[in-house]
Image (tube, rainbow, N blue to C red):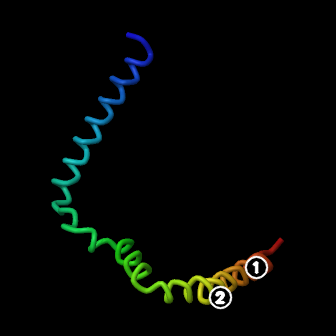
């Protein structure tokens, strides 16, 4: 068996092992995935951004820079307080 065949066999074995692990986890947790993508937070945020582009622009141009500025100031203060 050449290297390419060995990798293919190893890959298939790993895929089967992952599938088996997923089944075991599913049985242990006993939960199911949401029925639709509406239940995922990221999808919810993306829908809001798509439906209200003005809100997205305000967040990106006004709120986000303020938050980043606060974070950078906090980080700089923390570094200055650090004993040398």
1 lies left or right of 33: right
- Quarter of the picture holding the C terminus: bottom right
Is 73 situated left or right of 1 in this image? right
Nearest the viewer among 51 and 6 is 51
Where residue 71 sits: x, y (%)? Answer: 66, 81
Q: Earlier in the sequence, mark 1 or mark 2?
A: 2
In what quadrant of the picture does the N terminus appear? top left
Residue shown at 71% from the left, 79% from the top = 72
Q: Position of residue 68 (x, y in %)?
A: 65, 81
Position of 63 relative to 75 (above/below): below
> Which label number is shown at residue 67?
none
In the picture of the structure, the residue carrying the numbered disc 1 is 76
Mark 1 in CB contact with mark 2 (< 8 angstroms): no
Circle 1: element type: helix
Label 1 or label 2, whichever lies nearer to me, is: 2
Residue, far right: 84
- The residue that disc 2 covers is 66
Circle 1 residues within 10 Å: few <14, some 14–19, many ≥20: few
For numbered disc 2, what is the local secondary structure? helix
């Amino acid at each position: 068996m050449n290297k390419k065949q060995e990798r293919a066999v190893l890959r298939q074995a790993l895929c089967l092992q992952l599938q088996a692990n997923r089944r075991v986890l599913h049985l242990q947790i006993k939960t199911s995935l949401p029925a639709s993508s509406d239940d995922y937070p990221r999808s919810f945020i993306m829908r809001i951004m798509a439906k209200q582009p003005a809100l997205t622009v305000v967040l990106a141009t006004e709120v986000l820079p303020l938050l980043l500025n606060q974070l950078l100031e906090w980080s700089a203060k923390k570094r200055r307080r650090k004993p040398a």
